[in-house]
Image (tube, rainbow, N blue to C red):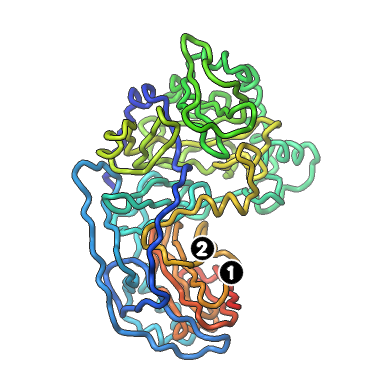
């Protein structure tokens, strides 16, 4: 993947009038996974496992020694992907690369030895690329996680990479001043900047000035006819909670300018979702149902700015993203994630990669409580709250355990508290930029004899059996400040 092809094919993008969207998710098929699967000792395939949990008082669980061997699907030569991976057909345990018997670890010092031997993961050299040795499973959530992997007929492939390497500043909490209007009000009030934003007062002032420039730019384009007259091309796809992308790439090679977005976002003026492709610009005028402007987006070429994460707006709130293996169905109004051959057969336009992108919501009428730079906008049709939107974006593969509870490891954090009924297993997706573990106990009092996932690389999934009621604490052995709780009723 360090040799990922960066074929942006600007002429093809313009011809297709395209640019986004890992954001359209499909409902995956689920397998009829037995309630109890076996946990192998160690294996070389990172995939899923069902590991029995114990009761609230640390007890001993007997781990079966049976190993299931996954079948593999090879990637056809017709598919051009940033990575070639395989889709496991059965559930197995991620390989543990240490020589330690994790059941013998009872102290923090022993845990540090375990960590020292386990941390042999090498991050990619650039924010645009993926590590070389991943063998991922489907998982992640576009707009909320560093990586998103999807299952295709050719195997599991990456479909999105977001944000700089390492910990990101994701201002997506509706209780924080993350929207354009809220950031502007915060500056005018002179109140201290919340620590969660990781912005200095000078950075806040500069950021609001940049957003104000962008807000002035869009006023002309509230009339979509002006948009058409200035050479923007509709992609004809209205993505839920985002809109339709009208693209003009004439400034893309100039690098980043906060007052020159390459994309304007529109939705139907009646706040309804279309049932197919929307209209298009013809001879400089709009032909189609009435539209309303809702936001903007930027698209920068890696050929111009390089493979590192863009130096865009002031501060660190702007997590740029890039799409891979995207089939744009401009004529039918929907995107898909299939092989290149299947995309061509369906009449779509296949993109093995698209440049760095960022949404910026600076229309006060559609102020975004999920953040000015969020991928999604809760004030854009179809309207939804943050919790519902997060749930709808989660990606699953055919190996997703039946009746399990999906949870994401992202941005160096677990979901703080997970509540499930006994038997509702918890299925962890590591969608972060680095490996993590799910280890029972606390950093000071590890209880790995109860459960431990082993090392989970980005893209690895792991299933925890929750047949025994109780309250279970767990942590990441590589990042001890990552802690969480599972309550099994």
- Secondary element type, mark 1: strand
Camera-side residue: 165 or 486?
486
Location of residue 36 in the rendering, given as x and y in whole percent from the top left corner: 40, 78
Location of residue 118 in the rendering, given as x and y in whole percent from the top left corner: 37, 72
**Could you classify mark 2 by the number of other residues whose Cα lies within 10 Å: few (under 14), some (14-19), or many (20 or more)?**
some
Q: Are marks 1 and 2 in contact (CB under 8 Å)?
A: yes
Q: Tell me what residue is drawn at x 44 percent, y 23 percent.
A: 249
Q: Tell me what residue is drawn at x 76 percent, y 38 percent.
A: 185
Q: Is residue 451 above or below residue 121?
A: below
Q: What residue is shown with label 2?
A: 407
Q: Is residue 27 above or below residue 235?
A: below
- Horizontal side of residue 489 vs 21, given as left or right: right
Camera-side residue: 189 or 322?
322
Q: Tell me what residue is drawn at x 36 percent, y 49 percent.
A: 158
Camera-side residue: 462 or 466?
466
**In the drawing, what numbered circle is on residue 418?**
1
């Amino acid at each position: 993947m360090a040799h990922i092809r960066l074929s942006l094919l600007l002429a093809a993008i313009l011809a297709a009038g395209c640019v986004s969207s890992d954001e359209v998710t499909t409902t995956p098929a689920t397998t009829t996974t037995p309630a109890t699967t076996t946990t192998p000792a160690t294996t070389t395939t990172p995939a899923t496992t069902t590991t029995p949990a114990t009761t609230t008082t640390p007890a001993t669980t007997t781990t079966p020694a049976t190993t299931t061997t996954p079948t593999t699907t090879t990637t056809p030569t017709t598919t051009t992907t940033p990575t070639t991976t395989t889709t496991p057909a059965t559930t197995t345990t991620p390989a543990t690369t240490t020589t330690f018997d994790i059941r013998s670890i009872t102290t923090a010092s022993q845990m540090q030895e375990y960590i020292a031997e386990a941390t042999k993961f090498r991050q990619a050299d650039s924010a645009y690329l993926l590590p070389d040795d991943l063998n991922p499973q489907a998982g992640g959530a576009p707009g909320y996680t560093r990586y998103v992997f999807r299952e295709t007929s050719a195997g599991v492939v990456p479909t999105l990479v977001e944000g700089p390497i390492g910990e990101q500043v994701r201002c997506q909490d509706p209780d924080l001043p993350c929207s354009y209007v809220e950031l502007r009000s915060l500056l005018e009030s002179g109140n201290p900047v919340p620590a969660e934003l990781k912005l200095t007062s000078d950075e806040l002032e500069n950021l609001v000035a940049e957003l104000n420039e962008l807000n002035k730019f869009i006023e002309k384009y509230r009339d979509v006819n002006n948009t058409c007259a200035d050479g923007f091309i509709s992609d004809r796809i209205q993505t839920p909670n985002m809109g339709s992308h009208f693209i003009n790439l004439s400034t893309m090679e100039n690098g980043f300018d906060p007052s020159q977005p390459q994309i304007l976002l529109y939705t139907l003026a009646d706040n309804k979702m279309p049932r197919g492709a929307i209209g298009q610009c013809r001879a400089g005028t709009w032909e189609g149902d009435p539209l309303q402007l809702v936001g903007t987006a930027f698209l920068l070429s890696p050929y111009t700015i390089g493979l590192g994460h863009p130096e865009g707006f002031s501060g660190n709130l702007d997590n740029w993203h890039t799409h891979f293996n995207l089939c744009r169905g401009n004529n039918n109004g929907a995107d898909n994630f299939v092989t290149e051959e299947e995309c061509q057969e369906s009449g779509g336009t296949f993109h093995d990669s698209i440049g760095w992108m960022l949404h910026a919501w600076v229309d006060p009428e559609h102020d975004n409580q999920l953040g000015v730079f969020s991928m999604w906008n809760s004030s854009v049709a179809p309207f939804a709250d943050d919790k519902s939107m997060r749930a709808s974006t989660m990606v699953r593969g055919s190996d997703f355990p039946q009746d399990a509870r999906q949870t994401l490891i992202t941005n160096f954090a677990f979901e703080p508290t997970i509540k499930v009924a006994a038997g509702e297993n918890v299925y962890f997706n590591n969608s972060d930029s680095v490996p993590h573990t799910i280890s029972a106990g606390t950093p000071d009092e590890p209880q790995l004899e109860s459960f431990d996932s082993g090392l989970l690389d980005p893209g690895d999934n792991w299933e925890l059996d929750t047949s025994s009621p109780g309250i279970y604490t767990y942590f990441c052995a590589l990042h001890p400040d990552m802690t969480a709780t599972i309550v099994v009723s």
